[in-house]
Image (tube, rainbow, N blue to C red):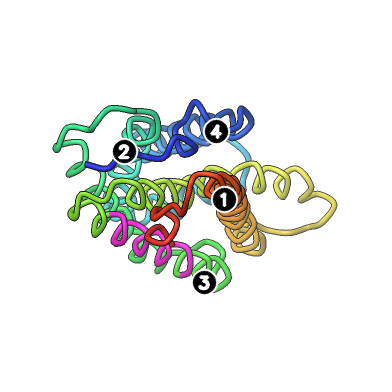
Amino acid sequence: MEPDPGVLQPHRSPLWLRIGFWICIVISVAVALRRVLALAHPSQGGPPQMAGLDDAFASHSAITLAHILPALLFVLIAPVIVFRRSPRPAFINVAFYSLGVIVGLTAYAMSAYSVGGWIERSAVFFYDTLFLISLARAWRYRTHNDSAPARRWELRSIAILLGIATTRPVMGVFFATSSATHLLPRQFFGIAFWIGFSINVLVFELWIRSVDRRMIRQSHSQGANPYLRRAQ
């Protein structure tokens, strides 16, 4: 099996990128656990806007849990995919791809209940489709024992999914300024989704292209790198 390029290994990635990754992991886990607890033990208190969101999710609790629980497991597996440097056990790969498909398909179903209407739904459709395409391409390379491009597409799928964590601080800004802007969740949720997911995708793509530029510079002295031709 072809080894992964060193520049895509976690110890070679920038510190800020690793910190951002772990922040997204923590936020994702916290959000998922909070939603599960809110569904299991509905609170009668809290700000009206948060109570309204809890009621909205409780109205379709089955599909919410069908989406959130696999997403939580996917997020917990993500660090293994990112940081394990030795070959992964087969069951890790099966779990990663299986959970990813479930998360992607249930995200489409969840969009029928979008708080932010069609603006949020359009963000979900766009980035969820990009997520599933990334998984499919990673799986294709993985089944052909082509680990370098497989890893690139796996990392891309993780970056996309963790966009849901980046939307939370963005939503926090909207909630904090709602007294001045008078925006309701249904008005800013879609905007927050577009901003959050776009940040993650843009950061990852800028980083991976900086990696490519370094590899190209190295290839001038070491010969052509076939990885670059396969990984696009």
Image quadrant occupied by the N terminus? top left
Magenta region includes residue 61: no
Residue 135 spot, x, y in % from top left: 32, 56
Q: Residues within 10 Å of mark 1 (few under 14, many from 20)?
A: few
Per the image, label 2 sits on a secondary structure element best described as loop
- Image position, residue 126 (x, y; %): 48, 69
Disc number for residue 3: 2
Badge 3 amino acid: Ser
Q: CA distance from mark 2 to mark 3?
A: 38 Å
CA–CA distance in space, label 1 to label 2: 21 Å
State which region is magenta: 126-138
Disc 1, SS? helix
Q: Amino acid at mark 4?
A: Ser
Marks 3 and 4 sit apart, C-alpha to C-alpha, by 32 Å
Q: Which callout, 4 or 2, points at the residue further toward the start of the chain? A: 2
Disc number lying in front (3 or 1)? 1
> Is residue 48 among the parts visible in the rendering?
yes
74 sits left or right of 199 in the view = left
Q: CA distance from mark 4 to mark 1?
A: 22 Å
The answer to whether mark 4 and mark 2 are in CB contact below 8 A is no
- Secondary structure of residue under mark 4: loop
Sequence-first tag of 1 and 2: 2
Apparent side of residue 212 relative to residue 125 in the rendered image (left or right): right
Looking at the image, is mark 1 or mark 2 nearer the viewer?
1
Residue on which the image places disc 3: 122
**Is 135 within the magenta?**
yes
Q: Is residue 22 above or below residue 228?
A: above
Residue 56 as seen in the image, left or right of residue 186: left
Q: Identify residue for label 4.
A: 13
Viewer-nearest residue: 99 or 56: 99
User: Dots 1 and 2: beta carbons under 8 Å?
Assistant: no
